[in-house]
Amino acid sequence: MSKYLNLKPKVIGRRSSILGALLFAFFIALSAQFGPYNQTQLANVSMLLIAVLSITLLTGASGQISLGQGAIMAVGGYGAALLVVRLGINMWLAFFLAIFISALFGLFLGLAAARLSGPYLAGTTLVMALAIPSIAVRFEGFFSGDVGFSVDYGVPPEWLSNLVGEITIEEWSLYAVLPFTALALIAVLNLSNSRTGRSWRAVRDNEVAAALSGINISRSKVIVFVCASALAGLAGALYGFRGLVAPSVYPTDLSLTLLTAAVIGGLRSIGGAIFGTFVVVYLPDIIEKISGGLEISESIGTHLPALILGALLLLTVILNPRGAAGSLEHLRHHKKH
């Protein structure tokens, strides 16, 4: 696989490492300013950002459409939970093995993607998103059905408590996730700037021209699905270890939420992925606070965040398909001229 990725040591650039370190420091600083609930929300942002970055690679960089990233999160979540609960494997090792399991799953998806495109590929991934949760229910004896597996991050190590003082459960969840988020950011940045990333963009823009230039289209699609699935699987493992790995944790609409975050922020932008993830995590809270002072029925209030997110998605697609990142780039270009 390494010879196909064409990643040279110099690709691990200073800018990407600095960005990962800055994001890590940013979340740490934020966590110290807010209470337990917002620390939990920041942890959710960190987890879901990894999954949104998988769409940045898959759709933004390569042009492959997937409506099943939430299902791949479930693959990673169940993979890690089964390793910990059934086999007694260390949690941290289970996270890395979940990456491998999800990448293997992505390999099979990539082989299908090499033969499919457009709505056919989107439809295939949507079927997958619908099927995987039902598998957990169907094979209840192995996957524990709707009940799922109770798993968590445990207690912080003693050396960390000695270093920073007393750590709450919410803080520990955030601290446990942040290194993985920083590593995912660095990986996506370097993949995007590598020869492999340039070949993905060539395939996205024009498959015929890419093939004529010597790019193996099928291999390119397989590799991007493997990389994107590895990211989504890691996100799913981290997301499940908040307390529960079960079908309810990875609903069908999770894939649409991830896609919404990527589109609102900008499919081709890592900064847009960060912005879009903050939007989908915090917008429901903002809407709840605003609607709390209005006389809105409970049935409408329950579905209002999803309706507004859907409206934002439609408006973004119609008015500005490049998302918030595209708008910012347009403003910069306008100021220069």
Image (cartoon, rainbow, N blue to C red):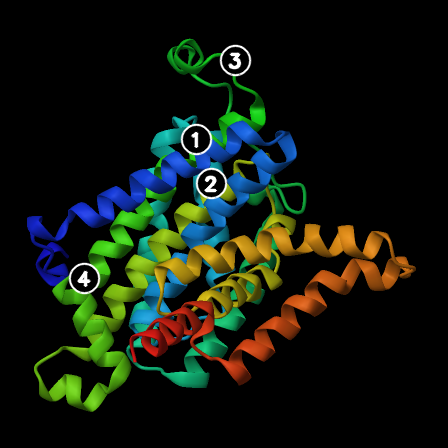
**Where residue 164 sits: x, y (%)?**
43, 15
Give amino acid for label 3: Glu
Q: Residue at x 69, y 50 (%)?
A: 285
How far apart in space, not on screen, are marks 1 and 2 (Cα)? Answer: 9 Å
The relative height of residue 172 versus residue 136 in the rendered view (above or below) is above
Which residue is the site of mark 2?
A: 238
Q: Which mark is residue 193?
A: 4
How far apart in space, not on screen, are marks 2 and 4 (Cα)? Answer: 26 Å
The relative height of residue 281 versus residue 108 in the rendered view (above or below) is above
Q: Circle 2 — which element?
A: helix
Tell us which disc is closer to us: 3 or 2: 3
* Left or right for 226, reference 284: left
How far apart in space, not on screen, are marks 3 and 1 (Cα)? Answer: 15 Å
Q: Which mark is residue 248?
A: none
Which residue is the site of mark 3?
A: 166
Q: Residue at x 32, y 48 (%)?
A: 184
Q: Are marks 1 and 2 in contact (CB under 8 Å)?
A: yes
